[in-house]
Image (cartoon, rainbow, N blue to C red):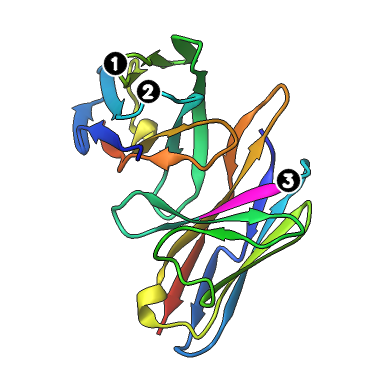
Amino acid sequence: GAVVSQHPSRVICKSGTSVKIECRSLDFQATTMFWYRQFPKKSLMLMATSNEGSKATYEQGVEKDKFLINHASLTLSTLTVTSAHPEDSSFYICSVYTTGANYGYTFGSGTRLTVV
Amino acid sequence: KQEVTQIPAALSVPEGENLVLNCSFTDSAIYNLQWFRQDPGKGLTSLLLIQSSQREQTSGRLNASLDKSSGRSTLYIAASQPGDSATYLCAVSAGNTPLVFGKGTRLSVIA
């Protein structure tokens, strides 16, 4: 599969501020990236599908104005949590689907966001 | 809507034991099924991917099987080691579409 780099791995921010999380596909040009959220001891829930050069597709119940997704290039997608609130504290993780010989889903290392 | 269930939710075994983790899914129209490992606070590591046309995949001490018609998959871990302790996630997809995950099985292998 691809090599996916996610940054930062941990971030603590104050309520009301915004936080940007980056997801980079290092060796694969990804027209599509997926953003997931994981609550403690829960499974991963898809938040949105990031499409290069166009608007992201959000899952039902996910506020698009709160979770801004930008996929400006084939190797970078960003998730910005705006006006962060303690309830936004969670583990965010991105994923890339790669085709070819080593096809499948590859995930970034995740970002632990804590809003205080 | 696809739903994925994993049983058991948690499992504790002594080192050296062989074990089976179970995964079931409601919609058999899948393209592939993928097993992942997740360590606490970390991302996901892909273990095995099975295409819908395949019945099993093997990697080292791991063997994953797929019965698409019955909506089931198993992950077999042979000769378990303490380093195998992690959460194991099963996920399915219909091709280049988002994965649908189960809630995982938390495995503890006791030395």
Give the overall secondary structure of the magenta segment. strand
Give how far across and how far down residue B66 sits, in percent. Answer: 39, 15
Give how far across and how far down residue B91 sits, in percent. Answer: 42, 34
Give the CA distance from mark 2 to mark 3. 27 Å
Residue located 47% across and 82% down the image: A84
Q: Give neighbour class at mark 1: few <14, some 14-19, many 20+ (Cα, 10 Å).
A: few
Secondary structure category for the residue under label 3 = loop
Location of residue B76 with respect to A46 vertically, above or below: above
Provide the residue designation for mark 3: A30
Provide the residue designation for mark 2: B28
Query: Magenta includes B57?
Result: no
Is residue B15 rendered to the left or right of residue B100? left
Is residue A29 rendered to the left or right of residue B24? right
Residue B12 falls in image quadrant? top left
Whether the residues at callouts 2 and 1 have beta carbons within 8 Å, the answer is yes
Identified by mark 2, the residue type is Ser
Provide the residue designation for mark 1: B70
Give how far across and how far down residue B68 sits, in percent. Answer: 38, 16
